[in-house]
Amino acid sequence: MEPIRLGMVGGGQGAFIGQTHRFAARLDGQFRLVAGALSSDPERARASGADLGLDPARSYDDFRTMAQREVRRKDGVEAVAIVTPNHMHAAPAIEFLKRGIHVICDKPLTATLDEAKKLQKAAEASQALFILTHNYTGYPLIRQARAMIAAGELGPLRLVQVEYAQDWLSEPVEAKGSKQAEWRTDPARAGLGGALGDIGTHAWNLAAFVVGEEPETLAADLHSFVPGRMLDDNAHVMLRYGSGAKGTLWASQVAPGNENGLRLRIYGEKAGIEWSQEDPNRLWFTRLGQPKQMLTRNGAGAWPEAQRVSRVPGGHPEGYLEAFANIYAEAARAIRARQAGQPAPDGVLYPTLTDGLSGMRFVAACVQSGKRNGAWVRI
Amino acid sequence: MEPIRLGMVGGGQGAFIGQTHRFAARLDGQFRLVAGALSSDPERARASGADLGLDPARSYDDFRTMAQREVRRKDGVEAVAIVTPNHMHAAPAIEFLKRGIHVICDKPLTATLDEAKKLQKAAEASQALFILTHNYTGYPLIRQARAMIAAGELGPLRLVQVEYAQDWLSEPVEAKGSKQAEWRTDPARAGLGGALGDIGTHAWNLAAFVVGEEPETLAADLHSFVPGRMLDDNAHVMLRYGSGAKGTLWASQVAPGNENGLRLRIYGEKAGIEWSQEDPNRLWFTRLGQPKQMLTRNGAGAWPEAQRVSRVPGGHPEGYLEAFANIYAEAARAIRARQAGQPAPDGVLYPTLTDGLSGMRFVAACVQSGKRNGAWVRI
Amino acid sequence: MEPIRLGMVGGGQGAFIGQTHRFAARLDGQFRLVAGALSSDPERARASGADLGLDPARSYDDFRTMAQREVRRKDGVEAVAIVTPNHMHAAPAIEFLKRGIHVICDKPLTATLDEAKKLQKAAEASQALFILTHNYTGYPLIRQARAMIAAGELGPLRLVQVEYAQDWLSEPVEAKGSKQAEWRTDPARAGLGGALGDIGTHAWNLAAFVVGEEPETLAADLHSFVPGRMLDDNAHVMLRYGSGAKGTLWASQVAPGNENGLRLRIYGEKAGIEWSQEDPNRLWFTRLGQPKQMLTRNGAGAWPEAQRVSRVPGGHPEGYLEAFANIYAEAARAIRARQAGQPAPDGVLYPTLTDGLSGMRFVAACVQSGKRNGAWVRI
Amino acid sequence: MEPIRLGMVGGGQGAFIGQTHRFAARLDGQFRLVAGALSSDPERARASGADLGLDPARSYDDFRTMAQREVRRKDGVEAVAIVTPNHMHAAPAIEFLKRGIHVICDKPLTATLDEAKKLQKAAEASQALFILTHNYTGYPLIRQARAMIAAGELGPLRLVQVEYAQDWLSEPVEAKGSKQAEWRTDPARAGLGGALGDIGTHAWNLAAFVVGEEPETLAADLHSFVPGRMLDDNAHVMLRYGSGAKGTLWASQVAPGNENGLRLRIYGEKAGIEWSQEDPNRLWFTRLGQPKQMLTRNGAGAWPEAQRVSRVPGGHPEGYLEAFANIYAEAARAIRARQAGQPAPDGVLYPTLTDGLSGMRFVAACVQSGKRNGAWVRI
């Protein structure tokens, strides 16, 4: 099967997330990068395109030109990856969606709720798909955790403890030349949330994906520990679910010793599960009163839902890029089905605009609760 | 040196905590159990005394008789361990304190704040010491963590994440004959808090011990998941410190897969530490930007504060009983000093009435916040 | 830069290792699969080619035809991956080498020493490169371990403890339809070694790569635990190095609970390191008398040698495919340099025929020692 | 029940192992130390006795006087703990055994086989018991592992991988004033084995205890890495069992990063178990093809054999001293039964002279094999 022709907006030289999307797109051979508007700086855009071996004619100075020209080509892009800072998601996404080009967009959805709603409209009006790369839902054992809960293995849920702790913003690195830190701590580009938007939305999405339900209300305590920082770098959030479950979500970028500590623990009446992104090939499962079990990806105790998105046998660790690539692989399946006028095959799962909007509402609710001194707020 | 003569109130046949106190008292040879009122049921009290090899004349039917008689003996008890359910702490403690007998009392302090205040008065009026067995502060690496923070190794603190998760109350075992569960879930005997009182106070105390500061305010979400249970079996609590630090405390007895999961993570501007009670011989320490270090009890990286309360070399694991015994060993040092009319030696540390009162206020504040839908409450 | 045109011999439908090579070749976009002789069964070869989207004209029935035709094409393959069972490595490799096409060959080198020598001659006579996919040397922290030892961080080495334990051959699965097991336990196809050849050679190679020295002599105790199995499924080997270091190598495929347990521990006068393939993003490093440090891939404590072959930041786990892809990436660098008539860039490292021959000698020495009841044998 | 009156030979000021025995003897209240010949230096013996609160009349200058006098006292010692260096085990043990006093002796049995045989004779001629403190067999989950294997949970055994790695002799500390190191590296006091005798015998004993069978033959490679050291500081040993199982034993005191790394892995046809002394409250158990299970001491998956020697619930870690105390507790049960003219109660297990002799033969066989360049030697 021919690879899907992919364009990219953002992700030029030095951009971590653009490169990640390219790895993910390439791993399964389902996409080929053929065009890009890789930077808002035209010179850099061109240099980046050359680095990636793009046809210079298809390495554009801006995404609008790219959209206009690509749509006219017979071999124009079928899908586009948007890997710009948050405030630059909506505009290009809308541009491509309205031309029927599928969009694979980095998270969080947008910087403002206003943009998010415009994007929603564009997506609803388009035949094209909108895929949001909440990549952590691509981990095989996260798929399994979701399936186990859906199958009732844990019984009715009681507790959802999710956390995402990092340490790279413990110092004011945004003032010392870190480009990554700069836009993430700038309200104009990041939106309402700092750690909340950058990693809190991942934690929120991951929990919702696995639990199969979102909290109804939350109470948040937000803080910026680093002097001068305008957005939160730590968020403590308590959660209440309509089903009666309770939870907490902790997002922090100022916790020394945490590289990328996304961890999920869910407890039901009958059993509990525990998973950590830094050790993603193991899912700990304990039935009440029985020994804890170590379920391994594609190994003993693996469910079909995990095996379906595994590439190598148990004991051969898969990681972040494989999980990210699973989102791309699901996107490819969905896009091909859509192109064939068919529904996506059974089991295909990827985050969508709905997830993106949910993340936006989560951030907004946290900010609102924070301003009201931690009052419980409907999401 | 002759062992200190010890009496015990409660802790008869089948009682877990009484046996634990006896192990702890024995390990270092600093105490000898010579008298007891081991059960409120006289027959059982006597049988328990016989089991323990007590002189039948000193195996009493009730603690009042014991106090009256022992104080008249030349070889009467010098200290008494109180290991009854919470609502039965104050009365015997007062009885012994007013006779100048040192009291080593299980936690939490009492079932009600009223009792706690009476006890406080009695303690203030007495020459005798009051030691509360918040045993987890006896772990050598907890001592080290406290010393490291006091020495500024972490820099100004930002985050205190403490949790204590168990699973043994996931089902209504109190209705199925578990004596341990029965009184702990009964407001009349346990007090205001369920999980809060039983384990939340440990978490609270541990954090305060290590941090060297207590939160000023908290916001709590309490819940009883097991139908019919009258006290909380899960508590989510957000914390704010006067210094500006923030934190969360989670106490749960309904989290399947957690046996005795007391865990502490503290992050400062410069470094972070992580410790888990189930793996107590390791303290994880990370200076910002440097590799995580595994500090081992009495091994590489051990501080004098940890070595002082270690018994065997690193690599030879110590556990729960050794930590508990450290409280007894500290008590012995303090008692001997008091008997000699001297201050306790440098470095001697044990939880006191102040800690007990703090725990009571913590529970009360949580309950109050819970009732006010998670409003922030002063402690 | 245009991807290198890659052919593949073997690796048709259902073959694990062929698929792995394709993932690895694709991840960095340095190779494009354009031709194949994917199975010795022509029908299956063609079907497999179609699955992979190969031009039917370049999906060959056999590797000889492929070599002859591809070499005549202007856009013929520049490199070929050989992913057949061991006894089918030499013939195709020679065929391509003698036509100047670079060979990327799965391990172990060949089934017999005789074939290995023929292959050696062909390689020496060819301008093309020969790359052996001892993929575990592609792990970033293995690169770092090698660099640390070379830099003297451990001091003179004393002990090398390497092991590779699996459990998938605990039962006679070769008699129950496992194709993977069938050829690996068949002397005609696997060669002299069973577990020794399949995984022992990996352990041998990994240790040599990191240590920078091979043992001079060894003493081996080989066994086939599964009745009827003709090749070893467990090997215990003691090692002696010329430098004075000692070691053991354990390879087993009958150890229940081990999925892919390749582990390496090396101790010198000054320090020790420990690494496990199933947790590859952490390297444990202990200077004598100091706390153990957790060095993380591309995180704190990472050396340039590890960062050079890392794709994502620390805390974002990389795994088996990334390590495998590193061998392909190194191959790409070496091939491009060779095509440009230049030496490989500084730092480029990949296993070669020399490593392959070493592995063959290792297996032969073990078998010889085994036959001589564990006598020490020169390698 | 009255404690058993205990004497001690050796174990004066500064001696680690003497103090350990005292902790172990005290924990359960089954022994009371009443007499001692605590040092071969009379002054130190007396000072040590005073430290321990011994009646000065029972703090002897030498073990012979102690034996003579104690046996004449009505309240004389019923049992004696011998905690001297290896070469000083036999003489005092014989002295007490011939007077009918039970002996609890540190390992290894003696420094020479000659002494061991004399001791054997004395023990056979005596009514008193001889208990050897191979303390690691006291760990509850080691008891469980033994029971599981005996019950056939693993199926017929295939592999026994045992190791005991430390690092404290990585440098010539014996030349720098370490008393502990001095005698352990001195052939006159330690006997034939260095690491072999000190820790190898523990590993040997532990494996035999759990497996229920000793190897028939072994092949050893011994080495002293530290210049000038006369006894081995590292031993690699391959093992063959009569049943057909194979194994390796590694003992090292020069492996930086290992504090007290006694680890045991046993694999059978049906399942495997893994245990590490530094994490003793967990036993990893994997049935072939099923998820690995974490069995916890006195928690989920605990067998009666483990619960019988556990003191606190699962999740409350027990450690080295508790395991050591279990040997003393078993000794107490056996001694009381013997005093009552009855057989030891069901389930009582402790290492005896037989284990000690086995350890001596193990060391001798290793040394012999080492001298014969690793030839297989019958034990």
Image (cartoon, coloured by chain):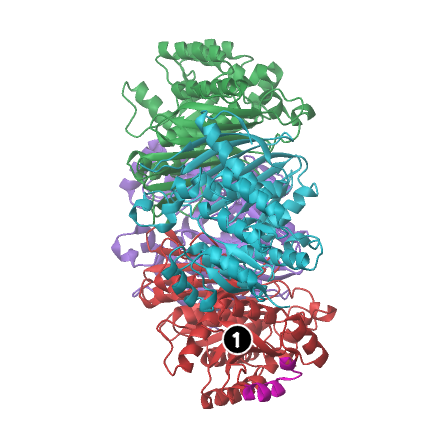
Chain colours: A purple, B red, C green, D cyan
Q: Nearer the viewer, residue D219 or C270?
A: D219
What residue appears at the point 35 percent right and 36 percent down from the top-left corner?
D225
Quadrant, the N terminus of chain D: bottom right
Query: Could you tell me what secondary structure mostly forms the magenta stretch?
Result: helix
The answer to whether residue A317 is seen in the rendering is no
In this image, B171 relative to D118: left or right? Answer: right
Residue type highlighted by circle 1: Gly
Residue beneath disc 1: B374
- The image quarter containing residue A267 is bottom right
Q: Position of residue B338 (x, y in %)?
A: 41, 81
Q: Nearer the viewer, residue C26 or D76?
A: D76
Q: Is residue B65 magenta?
A: yes
Q: Which residues are magenta?
A: B57-73
Say above or below: A1 vs A159.
above
What residue appears at the point 54 percent right and 57 percent down from the top-left corner?
D80
Q: Position of residue B249 (x, y in %)?
A: 49, 68
Say above or below: A105 vs A30.
below
In this image, A67 relative to C339: left or right? Answer: right
- The image quarter containing residue A305 is top right
**Secondary structure state at the residue bearing disc 1:** loop
